[in-house]
Image (cartoon, rainbow, N blue to C red):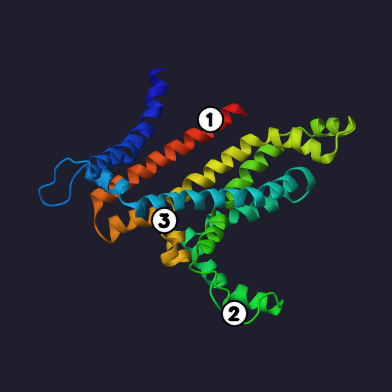
């Protein structure tokens, strides 16, 4: 038993030193007032909940995160199903193509969408050649839609991989038995495939929804002024306004929101 603790001690030390301790330091600062004579106060938290702007941005952040999670699920599930149950050869290549975006920076991927979505950009030129749009500009960049598109592209691989792993473990003989007993393909999917893949769906939803709550790079680049979310406010407090105490308070409110989200997802996961 002692040997186990000795083997675990380096990892525990790193976790405590670089994870837990900084959190407590930030928690300490979140209860300090601004100024040279800092004192303990609840003003930072009161200011957050008393100003409607921050509440609206929090609701907006949750809304965007839910839309991105739903979009990832709608695109990822059919793709994961095709990879797991239909394609017999080339699965490794398809997985590699999905994983490749992880090798590039989120910043690079966000700026690549700027070139695609800007007025007069690649997407607008392509749509004009197909005569899908007329003389007006595309008008997508620096909108909430651009933020959703960018975040969906960035977090989409998480959803695909988790659902694929869940479907890959599903025994094909169960599906074949259902069809042999007269069930239609839709009923087989509804009553067997979908329920048995819920663990992968919920895991993917957590891996997409939680990072979306704290994202600030993509909303800043793709959304501009219209892309302001709670993550961009925290960034401004720390790096632009230098309101570290208020920024720490907002960060802990966001952390509480993340923990609540994880609790809700865990509850659904236990019910599966």
Residue 128: tell me if it is visible. Answer: yes
Q: Which residue is mark 3?
A: 229
Residue 229 relative to residue 76: left or right: left
| In this view, 25 is above or below 157 | above
Q: Which residue is mark 2?
A: 136
Depth check, mark 2 against mark 1: the one in front is 2
Q: Which residue is mark 1?
A: 267
- Residue 46: where, in percent of width, then height? 26, 44
Marks 2 and 1, the one that precedes in the sequence: 2
| Alpha carbon distance from label 2 to label 1 | 48 Å
| Label 3 element class | loop
| In this view, 221 is above or below 13 | below
Residue 88: tell me if it is visible. Answer: no
| In this view, 118 is above or below 71 | below
Residue drawn at point x = 35 percent, y = 37 percent:
14
Image quadrant holding the C terminus, namely top right
Residue drawn at point x = 25 percent, y = 51 percent:
244
| Alpha carbon distance from label 3 to label 2 | 29 Å
User: Which residue reaches farthest top?
Assistant: 1
Residue 226 relative to residue 126: left or right: left
| Alpha carbon distance from label 3 to label 1 | 27 Å
Marks 3 and 1, the one that precedes in the sequence: 3
Quadrant location of residue 253?
top left
The foreground one among 193 and 233 is: 233
Contact check, label 3 and label 2, Cβ < 8 Å: no
Contact check, label 2 and label 1, Cβ < 8 Å: no
Residue 169 relative to residue 255: left or right: right
- Residue 187: where, in percent of width, then height? 80, 36
């Amino acid at each position: 038993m002692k040997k186990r603790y000795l083997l675990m001690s380096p990892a525990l030390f790193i976790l405590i030193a670089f994870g837990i301790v900084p959190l407590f330091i930030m928690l300490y600062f979140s209860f300090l007032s601004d100024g040279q004579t800092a004192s303990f106060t609840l003003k930072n938290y009161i200011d957050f909940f008393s100003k409607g702007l921050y509440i609206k941005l929090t609701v907006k952040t949750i809304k965007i995160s839910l839309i991105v999670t739903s979009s990832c699920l709608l695109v990822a599930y059919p793709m994961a199903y095709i990879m797991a149950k239909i394609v017999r050869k080339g699965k490794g290549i398809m997985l590699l193509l999905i994983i490749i975006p992880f090798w590039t920076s989120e910043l690079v991927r966000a700026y690549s969408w700027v070139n695609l979505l800007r007025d007069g950009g690649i997407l607008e030129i392509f749509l004009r050649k197909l005569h899908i749009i007329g003389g007006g500009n595309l008008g997508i960049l620096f909108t909430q839609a651009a933020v959703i598109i960018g975040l969906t592209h960035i977090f989409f691989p998480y959803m695909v991989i988790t659902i694929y792993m869940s479907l890959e473990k599903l025994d094909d003989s169960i599906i074949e038995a259902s069809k042999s007993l007269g069930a239609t393909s839709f009923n087989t999917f509804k009553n067997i495939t979908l329920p048995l893949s819920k663990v992968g769906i919920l895991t993917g939803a957590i891996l997409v929804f939680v990072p979306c709550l704290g994202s600030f790079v993509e909303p800043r680049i793709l959304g501009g002024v219209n892309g302001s979310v709670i993550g961009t406010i925290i960034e401004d407090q720390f790096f632009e306004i230098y309101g570290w105490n208020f920024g720490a308070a907002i960060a802990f409110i966001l952390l509480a929101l993340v923990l609540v989200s994880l609790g809700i997802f865990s509850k659904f996961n236990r019910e599966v």
